[in-house]
Amino acid sequence: MGLTIVVGYDGSDCAKAALNQALRLAGPTGRLVITYADAPPRIGASSLVPPEKVVELGRKVTAEALAVARQRGVPAEVVLEDDRPAEALLKVAARTGADLIAVGTRGESQLTGLLLGSTPYHLVHRATLPLLVVPLEA
């Protein structure tokens, strides 16, 4: 049996790069758990996007990722989590017995990661299983 990989996916170009690498690593004997986290809004942004729109977006982008996985012959499932991305990915990885977490990155600086809450930055410091951080150029 192949790897079980939890991949953080929000439809962005860097998430697509992570998905592609995760699909390559999992292959037809592995399994992907495509995870979308609808984090609570940042301070001051609570009225910008209604929660139902966030969930709707999550369903849409993960459906696209699921279709790509099926097209490439990789077993996959979708999980929508009501949590911040790093927390959600860690929880899903623990629940599914994942071998690896894959996320994309735009290459934010360490300071940007601290100030804005970069998911890869938090995962590097908290994950207890292997982590694949895929740059946008991959």
Image (cartoon, helix red, strand yellow):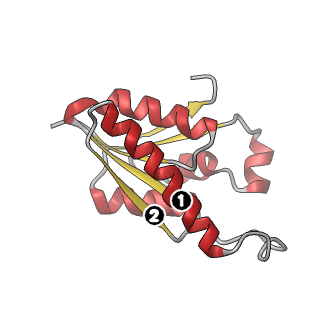
Query: Which quadrant of the structure image shows residue 24?
Result: top left
Mark 1, other Cα within 10 Å: few <14 / some 14–19 / many ≥20: many
Query: Which quadrant of the structure image shows residue 21?
Result: top left
The residue under label 2 is which amino acid type?
Leu
Q: Which numbered circle lies on residue 58?
A: 1
Q: Are marks 2 and 1 in contact (CB under 8 Å)?
A: yes
User: Vertical placement of 46 versus 123: above or below?
Assistant: below
Q: Which numbered circle lies on residue 80?
A: 2
Q: Where's residue 92, x and y in %?
A: 39, 60
The residue under label 1 is which amino acid type?
Gly
Q: Where's residue 82, x and y in %?
A: 52, 71
Query: Which quadrant of the structure image shows residue 130?
Result: top left
Q: Earlier in the sequence, mark 2 or mark 1?
A: 1
Front one among 63 and 127: 63
Q: Where's residue 77, x and y in %?
A: 32, 52
48 sits to left or right of 39 = right
Separation of marks 2 and 1 at Cα, in angstroms = 7 Å
